[in-house]
Amino acid sequence: MSQQKSKLLKTYIYPAFFIEEKEGGYSVIFPDLLGCQTQGNSLAESLLMAKEALSLYIFDKLQDKKELPKASNPKKIKNEQENLILMVKVNYQNFNFSFRYW
C-alpha cells in the first residue's frame, strides 16, 4: 500500500454490548457513542449491523468535523447484566456515501 493511501485509511475499534433479546435476536449498543445502536436476528447479523452503524456514526461525526470519543477499555466497562461485549472494528478510508433518489 502506498504511503499516501495508508494516510487515508484509519481503523476504528469500539466496544459494544450485544444483548440477547427474549423475543430472539440481539440488540447492540455502543456505550461510548451516544445514540449508536442497532439490532439483528442472529449474533452474526447483529455484528454486521453493528459495523454498519459504527461506520455511519463515524462518517456523520467526521462530516460535521466533530471529535470522536476515545474507546473505553472493555475490561473497565460497567456490565452488571453480564452482556456479551465485543470489539467492533471498521476501516474508514475517506469513503463517500452518495444517495440517489429516483
Image (cartoon, grey):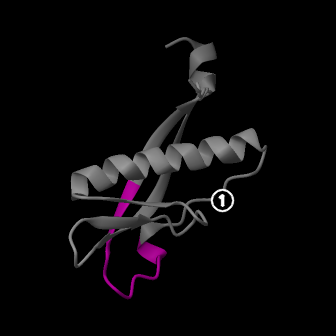
Asked if residue 15 is positioned above or below residue 23 in the image, the reply reads above
Magenta span includes 85: yes
**Residue 14: x, y in percent?**
49, 56
Magenta span includes 25: no
Q: Amino acid at mark 1?
A: Pro
Residue nearer the viewer, 98 or 33: 98
Q: Which residues are magenta?
A: 75-87
Q: Provide the secondary structure element on which disc 1 rests.
A: loop
- Residue on which disc 1 sits: 69
Asked if residue 27 is positioned above or below residue 101 in the image, the reply reads below
> What is the crowding at mark 1: few (fewer than 14 residues within 10 Å), some, or many (at least 20)?
few
Q: Quadrant of the C terminus?
A: top right
Q: Residue at x 62, y 24 (%)?
A: 8
Residue 21 lies in what quarter of the image? bottom left
**Residue 38: x, y in percent?**
43, 59
Residue nearer the viewer, 27 or 101: 101
Q: Residue at x 46, y 41 (%)?
A: 90
